[in-house]
Image (cartoon, rainbow, N blue to C red):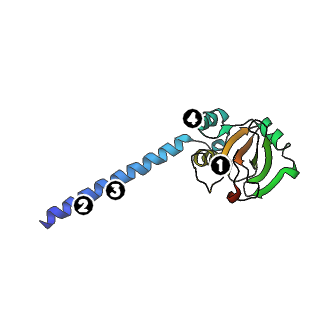
Amino acid sequence: MKLGLGLGLGGGGGVVLICSLVLVWFIGICRGSKGGDEEDNNALDEEDMDDEFERGTGPKKFSYKELARATDNFKGEQKIGQGGFGGVYKGFLKDLNCFVAVKRVSKGSKQGIKEYATEVKIISKLRHRNLVQLNGWCHENKELLLVYEFMPNGSLEWKITC
């Protein structure tokens, strides 16, 4: 009885170990085939991101020209904040007839394209009264821009939607 139990457990454990090793090997192969160095992984493929971002409903694509015009070409007077990822600028979008906050990801930011894409995909799906709404995005001219609703008093308590 003990011999059968030992063989059964040993054999089952061996199968689990082999399956785990195959899974780890497969994941390594898949990651390796996506290829390239860090620079390749951060290359901006605007068409692929456009297709992926526009599949769902939610934030819209803005042109760089439109956002530059809204923020007075990202002038210092329009800057309302600075974070680890870059500056945030107040802008007015005539088409929407409302103020927005435009987050301009700095080119030297460690955030990078992957994190920018993740932010657009995830935050665009979140809806909560205590979260600032993502209204749109732009990635043109090697710029990464996120358009959020503007909080005039810096607080969601006084939220005004457009």
Residue tagged by mark 2? 10
Side of 55 relative to 18 (left or right)? right
User: Which residue is at the front of the view, 40 or 153?
Assistant: 153
Q: Position of residue 68 (x, y in %)?
A: 81, 40
Q: Dots 4 and 1: beta carbons under 8 Å?
A: no
Of the image marks 1 and 3, the number of the one nearer the N terminus: 3
Tell which residue pokes out farthest to the left in this image.
1
For disc 3, the marked residue is 17
Hey, what amino acid is under mark 2? Gly
- Please rate how many residues cluster around mark 4, counting C-alpha atoms within 10 Å: few if below 14, some from 14 to 19, many from 20: few
The dot on residue 55 is: 4
Q: Which residue is mark 1?
A: 133
Marks 4 and 2, the one that precedes in the sequence: 2
Element carrying mark 4: loop
Q: Would you call the spot at circle 2 few (<14 residues within 10 Å), some (14-19), or many (20 or more)?
A: few
- Whole-percent x, y for residue 105 in the image: 73, 49
Per the model, the C-alpha gap separating discs 1 and 2 is 54 Å
The answer to which of marks 4 and 3 sits earlier in the sequence is 3
Residue 35's image quarter? top right
Answer with mark 2 or mark 3, whichever residue precedes in sequence.
2
Relative height, residue 23 to residue 141 (above, below): below
Point out the frontmost of discs 1 and 3. Answer: 1
